[in-house]
Image (spheres, grey):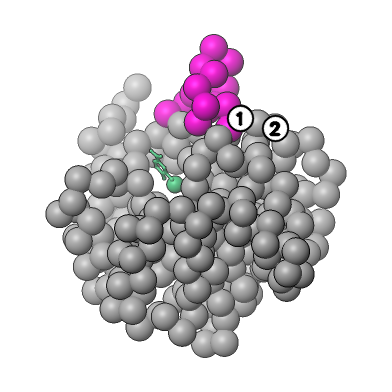
Amino acid sequence: MKTSPETWTNNDNYLNAHLVKENRALKQATNAIRNTNLPQMEVSPAQGKFLYLLAKIAGAKRILEIGTFYGYSTMWLAKAVPDDGLVMSLEFCELFVNMAQKNIDDAQLSNKVTLLFGDAAASLKKLITDKAEPFDMIFIDAHKPSYPEYLELSLQLSRPGTVICGDNVIRDGELSNMNNVTPNVLGTREFTEALGALDSIESTALQTVGIKGYDGFTISLVN
Ligand code: DHB
Ligand code: MG
């Protein structure tokens, strides 16, 4: 094989410099997390901008994000919605909610973002019971074993035309390794197979390499 993770990283850094152009708030938020020993599990800058462009292409005004972490993808998505738009982001870890809120405030995006602290499945069920307006785009990026449940609940918060994106499904290529039955791989595998089995949604997935290693995401359109 011609390329290595080092090549992927060099090219991701090149793309970041020439195409992505993160603003000060995004860079600052990432710098702050690098001074902690928290995992580097946010999307890459190129993926963040991809989500931003996808939201704009879809004309999304209401976006649901499952898994906030420190708000990196949340901020990209919030930049994509109009002034009267909304990004609702669900997060189980109180520390992450506090970090994300600070980053979102610093980025002057608080008017477009609502962070919901708590178990994501419980928050989704409450949104369904409360008859929340359907979302235009849903980004699933939280607890991997819960992806199948997040999908089932997300569909109840969708309308025809809703875009659903699921992060981290390829998992260093373990998705298709049927000998790997660890909870994270099983979760994203069941999620992927559920997407494929549903008539109500059209899906594909893209494998990615870069600063986050070898992974990939699903992308779906609700019919
Ligand atoms: C992990 C989670 C993510 O959402 C991600 O993008 C990368 C890694 C993790 O749980 O390790
Ligand atoms: Mg992720």
Measure how far apart labels 2 and 1 are at the Cα level.
Answer: 6 Å
* Callout 2: CB less than 8 Å from ligand 2: no
Q: Is residue 198 visible?
A: yes
Q: Which residue is at a point 30% across and 72% down the rendered structure image?
A: 102
User: Quadrant location of residue 122?
Assistant: bottom right
Q: Is residue 37 above or below residue 99?
A: above
Locate residue 94 relative to residue 7 in the image: left or right: right
Looking at the rendering, the stretch of residues picked out in magenta corresponds to 172-187
User: Which image quarter holds the N terminus?
Assistant: top left
Residue 88, percent from left and from top: 54, 69
Instruction: Give yes or no for contact between labels 2 and 1 (Cβ–Cβ under 8 Å).
Output: yes
Residue position marked by numbered label 1 in the rendering: 189
Tag on residue 193?
A: 2
Looking at the image, which is closer to me, 24 or 135?
A: 135
Q: Would you say residue 53 sits in the magenta stretch?
A: no
Say which amino acid is labelled 2: Glu
How packed mark 2 is, by other alpha carbons closer than 10 Å (few <14, some 14-19, many 20 or more), is few
Q: Which residue is at a point 22% across and 68% down the rendered structure image?
A: 28
Residue 138, percent from left and from top: 61, 59
Query: In what element is the residue under mark 1?
Result: helix
How packed mark 1 is, by other alpha carbons closer than 10 Å (few <14, some 14-19, many 20 or more), is many
